[in-house]
Image (spheres, grey):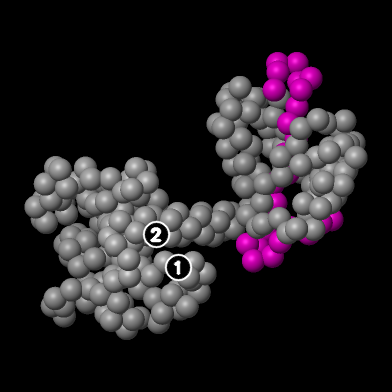
Amino acid sequence: MLPALQALGRREEEVSVAGLEEELVKALRISSEERSRMLPSGAQTVFANRLNWARSYLSKAGLIDLLRRGFCRATQRGRDLIAEGVAEINLAVLERYPEFNAWRTQQKVEHVSGPMSSRGGADETIAASFEHLNTELAREIIARVHSFSPAFFERRIVDLLVRMGYGGGRLEMGRALGRVGDGGIDGVIKEDELGLDVVYVQAKRLDPENGVPVRKIRDFVGGLDGHRATMGVFVTTSYFPSSAYEFIRGCRNGWF
């Protein structure tokens, strides 16, 4: 974490993660073999994973800003810490900052102990950190989604489904309705040119801590019935409680 913060502290402007990685490879004299070593999951290099950990912890302590995806910049707090001449940045240093302590308290992934863990082997810690970072990324994405309008979320979900292959992957086949009260339907994706086969979409931007109310599912199923639809996708920033699954299983059309 200290080399990453020092590299960012040498610049006033934001730095891309790729640029930061290149600079640290040179500063720490990371060999090409070391740099290419992969996590056990094979999804990311160990070096990139540890750099992501460093960025995550530094940002939670307010030492750097993650201004936009893929870019970061040292804060004045981070520059002040560098000026102190600390020999390393560890948990004891990060715990000076109330934001970091608050974040640690809120963690729900109890089996992850962080990059300074002494429990288990190095591979275990790295694999756990990768899972933790995915969780953090999901939280950051949801927080960003909630900073925009519901219409923005609806449009993004339709675009996402199209890019996943619905509508043949053609953006023009998907459309967010952009209005309220259309039978519980927020968007449509045509599976064929004539629109005879249609996927109906519901996108609900809800509080992540509260499950989707069953009435929302009921409204969506009613909307599908009203359109005589055979396919529907309900996407939310929240989660589906067991009561929602029970309702779907009991529907006469067998929606699931």
Name the image quarter holding the N terminus: bottom left
Q: Residue at x 59, y 42 (%)?
A: 156
Between 242 and 68, the residue placed more toward the observer is: 242
Picture layout, residue 94 above or below residue 69: below
Residue range in magenta is 191-216
Apparent side of residue 156 relative to residue 101 in the rendered image (left or right):
right
Q: Main secondary structure of the magenta part?
A: loop
Q: Which residue is mark 1?
A: 111
In terms of image quadrants, where is residue 72?
A: bottom left
| Residue 20 percent across, percent down from the top left | 22, 52
Q: What is the residue that sits farthest to the top in this orientation?
A: 194
Which label belongs to residue 134?
none
Queried whether the magenta region covers residue 196, the answer comes back as yes
Local crowd size for mark 2, using a 10 Å CA cut-off: few (<14), some (14–19), many (≥20)? some
Which of disc 1 and disc 2 is earlier in sequence? Answer: 1
Name the image quarter holding the C terminus: top right
